[in-house]
Amino acid sequence: MNATPEKIIPGVVAELNPLVRRLTAPNPGVMTGPGTNTYIVGEQDLAVIDPGPVIESHLQGLIGAVGDRLRWIVCTHTHLDHSPAAMALKHATGAQVVGMPTADDGRQDTTFAPDRVLGEHDTVDLGSCVLRAVHTPGHVANHLCYLLENQQLLFTGDHIMQGSTVVITPPGGDMSDYLASLAKLLRMDIAELAPGHGHVITRPHDEIRRLITHRLKREQKVLDAFAKKNPATLDELLPLAYDDVPAKIHHVARRSLHAHLIKLLHDELVSEHAGYWALESTSTQ
């Protein structure tokens, strides 16, 4: 991988190494960065990881890049910027869709219908290489990362994104699960991370530790916010716990704040009644 990666240009196929190419969808934004990365993996038999949203130019770009060699359409999860193009790509190529379904929380791709359901340690064999599923719930319950075993390259979907932190949105998202999934990756032999948004991350364990530290610092800011208002509604806590985040994205931060509060509730550090959250008197900060 390049030490200084070139700018990601949606619609342009970028070869990351002889086994991996990236085609980024033209859906840039606050939540998606430069756009959703679709990865094409393999030599003869190919897999596509995260076909992305149904955008005709992206779909045609994928079809042109894989030709008649696509065997697998692999989804990390079923949010609307990652999996909806799976069915159209299947119809165009005959490839099988694989991944893990989940309950619909109003944010899922309800068209997702895997031909094969994957779970922890399940593999996708491409002949020249193997993808192994790693269950990483947290961003959403059905999130899977995929390890390209001969390179120890981990495709992280939305579990880890380059240049940004991941939003955890209850009820599908769970902060306790997210932190546990990050800790799980620390115990793995990983050389690089290929995220669903942004560039390849070349110091994976440093990045994972940074994310864990960031989340725990945010949790402490949530606890500290109760010193100014206790009990408080979620919206009253938001500007206190996220005073370092621009107000224009507080509507997004609100989701992760809710996830932090649910974790703290399960940890018995806070309580909740009728929409008001309170720091328990036995809590230590």
Image (cartoon, grey):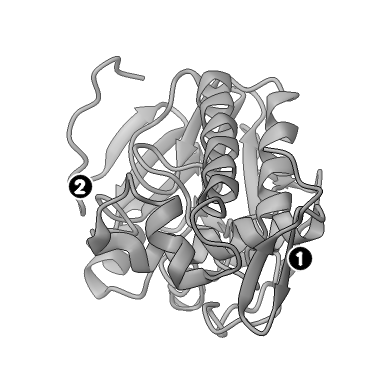
Q: Nearer the viewer, residue 160 or 18?
A: 160
Question: Which residue is labeled 2 in the image?
Answer: 12
Identity of the amino acid at label 2? Val
Secondary structure state at the residue bearing disc 1: strand
Crowd band around label 2 with a 10 angstrom C-alpha radius: few (<14), some (14–19), many (20+): few
Q: Quadrant of the N terminus?
A: top left
| Residue 183 image point, x, y percent | 71, 33
**Residue lying at 43% horizontally and 46% vertically, measured from the top left:** 39
Q: Which mark is residue 117?
A: 1
Disc on the earlier residue, 2 or 1 = 2
Residue 99 seen in this snapshot: no
Crowd band around label 1 with a 10 angstrom C-alpha radius: few (<14), some (14–19), many (20+): few
Q: Is residue 137 above or below residue 90?
A: above
Left or right? Give the position of 69 relative to 259.
Answer: left
Q: Nearer the viewer, residue 140 or 35?
A: 140
Q: Quadrant of the C terminus?
A: top right
